Image (spheres, grey):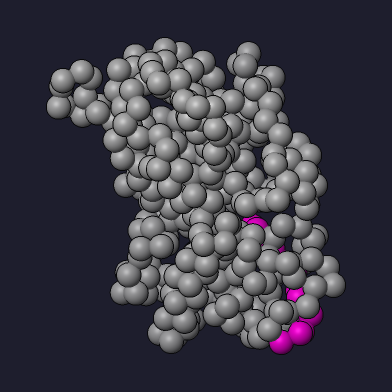
């Protein structure tokens, strides 16, 4: 997993997958490709970054519209986790729609239903972009059930509908305009006995539902990693520092926007070799990471970072006014301040993008 640019992507061919092949990915991924150790895999952090650059966007409106290219990163997933924790725990599960065999792979239709009906969700956890919910025993049994893994992929969001019909969402960047909701985008649902429901809504169908997900392949969460852990994880080797930050096996939860924001805040060149970072560079990067994560969670998503609005041709650094530069680092579209992040920089030119 992580940013290894080596592996490729093949088309899926099964019936339901085939309906939206370009958005879905491959149900026949090799075991090692399908997110190490059975992790609830996605295209944003569990497969190659170069691969996801080639995944078509269904309606690529950069601002507004129902899909604007923003991908759930740690802050968005945390809002989804909090929504589940606040609104979906301790309701008895009476039904499960697990008919989407791609999102619910490798489980067969009905397998998730059989495992979950009669239980309740009892806790919601997150590491990086991966979530999982603990489940109760059935009836009077105190023996807990399986963990329910939920990954939002590149466009997923969680919708919880209360028994009174009130709907709340989590997992997408905060927007002023309400997002449309087509029933065909519902990829998985828990129906609660009291009439409420929890739904994974996912336009691009790259989210994932899986029992007992293996999260051990993920590094420490970006919101919780300690300074000493961060120093040792971030500074070994010669890879570009941005690529290292996107490597979910090292630090879990950082996506493309958050990485650009953090590197800009720390005034570090995104292509600088991690081996060239001094202790004070790593420490500055750590504090920028923690600050950016806290701010993004509070403000509604990674898109709220200070430099994000300047990530476009002609953009100026919000801090010093210098021109923003663009290139590809670690396989990802990258923006940086031409003055404050210029040193040691070696990047290949690339087209403007997100
Ligand atoms: Zn600047």
Q: Nearer the viewer, residue 168 or 71?
A: 168
Image location of residue 185, percent across then percent down: 64, 27
Furthest residue in direction right, as rendered = 314
Above or below, 248 relative to 19: below
The structure residue drawn at horizontal position 44% and vertical position 74%, both measured from the top left corner, is 286
The structure residue drawn at horizontal position 63% and vertical position 63%, both measured from the top left corner, is 304
- Determine if residue 192 is in view: yes
Horizontal side, residue 44 vs residue 138: left or right: right
The structure residue drawn at horizontal position 65% and vertical position 22%, both measured from the top left corner, is 183
Q: Nearer the viewer, residue 166 or 59?
A: 166
Q: Which residues are magenta?
A: 320-332
Image location of residue 80, percent across then percent down: 48, 44
Image location of residue 325, percent across then percent down: 75, 74
Queried whether the magenta region covers residue 219, the answer comes back as: no
Image quadrant in which you'd find residue 133: top left
Horizontal side, residue 23 vs residue 64: left or right: left
Image location of residue 98, percent across then percent down: 47, 19
């Amino acid at each position: 997993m992580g940013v290894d640019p080596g592996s490729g992507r093949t088309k899926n061919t099964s019936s339901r997958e085939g309906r939206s092949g370009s958005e879905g990915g491959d149900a026949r991924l090799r075991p090692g490709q399908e997110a190490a150790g059975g992790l609830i895999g996605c295209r944003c952090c569990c497969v190659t970054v170069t691969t996801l650059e080639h995944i078509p966007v269904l309606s690529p409106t950069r601002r507004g519209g129902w899909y604007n290219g923003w991908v759930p990163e740690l802050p968005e997933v945390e809002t989804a986790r909090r929504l589940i924790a606040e609104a979906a725990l301790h309701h008895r599960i009476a039904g499960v729609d697990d008919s989407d065999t791609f999102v619910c792979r490798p489980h067969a239709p009905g397998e998730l239903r059989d495992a979950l009906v009669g239980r309740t969700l009892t806790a919601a956890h997150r590491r990086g972009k991966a979530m999982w919910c603990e489940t109760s025993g059935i009836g009077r049994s105190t023996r807990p059930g399986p963990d329910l893994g939920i990954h939002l992929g590149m466009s997923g969001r969680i919708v919880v509908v209360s028994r009174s019909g009130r709907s709340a969402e989590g997992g997408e960047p905060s927007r002023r305009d309400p997002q449309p909701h087509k029933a065909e985008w519902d990829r998985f649902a828990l129906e609660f006995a009291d009439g409420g429901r929890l739904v994974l809504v996912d336009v691009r169908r790259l989210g994932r539902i899986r029992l007992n997900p293996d999260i051990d392949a993920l590094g420490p969460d970006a919101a919780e990693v300690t300074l000493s852990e961060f120093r040792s994880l971030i500074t070994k080797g010669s890879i570009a520092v941005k690529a290292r930050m996107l490597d979910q096996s090292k630090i879990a939860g950082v996506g493309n926007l958050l990485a650009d924001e953090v590197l800009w805040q720390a005034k570090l060149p995104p292509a600088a070799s991690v081996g060239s970072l001094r202790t004070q560079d790593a420490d500055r990067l750590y504090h920028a990471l923690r600050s950016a994560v806290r701010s993004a969670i509070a403000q509604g998503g990674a898109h709220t970072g200070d430099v994000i609005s300047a990530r476009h041709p002609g953009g100026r650094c919000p801090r010093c006014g210098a021109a923003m530069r663009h290139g590809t680092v670690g396989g990802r579209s990258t923006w940086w301040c031409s003055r404050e992040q210029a040193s040691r920089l070696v990047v290949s030119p690339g087209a403007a993008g997100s």
